[in-house]
Structures are given as C-alpha cells and as structure tokens.
C-alpha cells in the first residue's frame, strides 16, 4: 500500500466505515478481454457500489488517464460508482486542508 492508501485506510477505519481494500472485480464481468485478470478497486463500499480511487501524480499522464477512463467507464456500465481523488499529501497546511476537504466529501457520501 502506498502512503496515500495507508492514510485513507486509517481515516476510513477510524470512522468505522464498511469498505473492502483492493476489492477484486473480474474483467470478464465487465466485458473486458483478458478474462483471467481482475481489476483491483482501492476502496470499495459495497452498500453503495462505490469505488474510491486515490490517485497519485502518475494518473495525470496521458496514457494513464486513457486507461483510467476505459476502466472507469467499464465499471460504471456495470453499475459501479467511481470516485477518483488526487492525492495532495499532508505535509503542508495547504495539503492538509485540501485532503481534509476530500475526506469530508467522502464521509458525507458513504455515511
């Protein structure tokens, strides 16, 4: 787990939320070739079928953005909700404030 994922895991656990880390979704159930492979959802909330993805800076690269869009579209077509949040960090006061705003949004959605 990355630092960002550990941070979110701690936050979600502290709020006693029901989620699954690295939830597996078989690609064949999404109509994606390579039936033996799975997608792994960072944080999955089964009650509302929400995939919460915490994205590092690599998700801003054009090829990664294209892959993410294809993945998200396949999940959405199968009835999942996808929420992607960029990782801002928690080192500076500005980073902490931006991350706390994200936390509040997620908590409002899943509680």
Image (cartoon, helix red, strand yellow):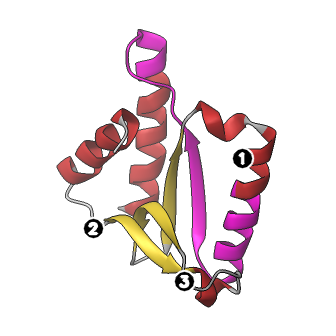
Percent x, y for residue 93?
41, 11
Give the quarter of the image for residue 3: top left
SS class of the residue under badge 3? Answer: loop
Q: Dot 2, crowdedness within 10 Å: few (<14), some or many (≥20)?
A: some
Q: Sequence order check: which comes first, mark 2 or mark 1?
A: 2
Q: CA distance from mark 2 to mark 1?
A: 29 Å
In the foreground, 12 or 54: 54
The residue carrying mark 1 is 64
The residue carrying mark 3 is 36
Give the quarter of the image for residue 77: bottom right
Q: CA distance from mark 1 to mark 3?
A: 22 Å
Q: Sequence order check: which comes first, mark 1 or mark 3?
A: 3
Mark 3 vs mark 2: give the one in front: 3
| Residue extending furthest toward the top | 92
Which residue is pictured at 60% across the width and 80% down the height? 27
Q: Which residues are magenta?
A: 68-96
Asked if the residue under mark 1 is in contact with the one under mark 2, i.e. CB atoms within 8 Å, the reply is no
Residue 99 to residue 107: above or below: above
Mark 2 vs mark 1: give the one in front: 1
Asked whether residue 63 is drawn in magenta, I would say no
Residue 39 to residue 1: above or below: below
Which residue is pictured at 52% across the width and 52% down the height? 53
Label annotation for residue 18: 2
Percent x, y for residue 83?
58, 56
Asked whether residue 76 is drawn in magenta, I would say yes
């Amino acid at each position: 787990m990355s630092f960002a994922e550990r941070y979110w895991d701690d936050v979600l656990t502290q709020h006693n939320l029901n989620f699954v880390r690295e939830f597996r979704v078989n690609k064949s159930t999404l109509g994606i070739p390579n039936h033996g492979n799975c997608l792994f959802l960072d944080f999955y909330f089964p009650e509302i079928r929400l995939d919460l993805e915490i994205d590092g800076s690599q998700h801003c690269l054009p090829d990664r953005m294209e892959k993410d869009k294809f993945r998200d579209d396949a999940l959405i077509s199968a009835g999942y909700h996808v929420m992607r949040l960029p990782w801002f960090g928690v080192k500076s006061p500005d980073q902490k404030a931006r991350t706390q705003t994200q936390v509040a949004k997620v908590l409002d959605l899943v509680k």
